[in-house]
Image (cartoon, helix red, strand yellow):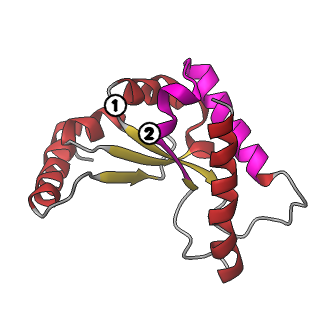
Amino acid sequence: VPEPAEVRAVLGTVVDAARAAGAAGVSAHCCAGEVPFEVLRGAGIDTVSLDLGAVGERADEALGAWWDVGGTVHLGVAPALDPPPEPRGRAEGMARRVEQVWQRIGFGAADVAARTWLTPTCGLAGASPAWARSVGGELRAAARMLESAE
């Protein structure tokens, strides 16, 4: 297993190459339950994408520190695969989960909403075409709810 400094150095090389090629920002997705925020920050990553359900409350402190230094977060709140039918309330549930995270950490929409994007928990490669089309609408609806809560 590589040491964090080794990982940071290799990722830093990738980040440097992306910026040299014209990238305005560099994002990393982490499916793990423990996101290596410090390693990613040290490598120059601007945005961390994560599965909110996988990280749970144990990531609150690190997530708050990421926002404190101006980082952007893609919060995976929507299922990546077709979820069971839900008559109503999916977007409301996603918005409520994000609000709960912000409240636990001590932020509000005015503090970090512009640097918080709502996303599926992971890629949509295994989702049905119908879910892949509809998930964007669900996420937009949840984001509008969060914006109106400001």
Image quadrant where residue 57 sits:
top right
Image quadrant where residue 101 sits:
top right
For numbered disc 2, what is the local secondary structure? helix
Camera-side residue of 62 and 89: 89
| Label placed on residue 70 | 1
Mark 1: which amino acid? Gly
Q: Residue at x 33, y 52 (%)?
A: 27
Question: In the rendering, at what x and y percent does residue 50 appear?
Answer: 49, 48
Q: Main secondary structure of the magenta part?
A: helix
Camera-side residue of 78 and 141: 141
Does residue 141 appear left or right of residue 72 in this picture? right
**89 vs 80: above or below:** above
Camera-side residue of 82 and 100: 100
Question: Do tag 1 and tag 2 residues touch (Cβ < 8 Å)?
Answer: yes
Does residue 98 appear left or right of residue 39 in this picture? right
The residue segment tinted magenta is: 91-118
Q: Residues within 10 Å of mark 2 (few under 14, many from 20)?
A: some
Q: Label 2, on which residue?
A: 115
Q: Which of the two discs, 1 and 2, labels the residue nearer the N terminus?
A: 1
Question: In the rendering, at what x and y percent does residue 126 appear?
Answer: 60, 76
Question: In the rendering, at what x and y percent does residue 148 appear?
Answer: 67, 37
**68 vs 42: above or below:** above
Q: Residue at x 26, y 51 (%)?
A: 25
- Residue located farthest toward the right when viewing the structure as drawn: 87
- Residue located farthest toward the left when viewing the structure as drawn: 20
Question: In the rendering, at what x and y percent does residue 134 appear?
Answer: 69, 70
Membership of 66 in magenta stretch: no
What is the quadrant of the C terminus in the image?
Answer: top right
Q: Residue at x 82, y 65 (%)?
A: 84
* Number of marks drawn: 2
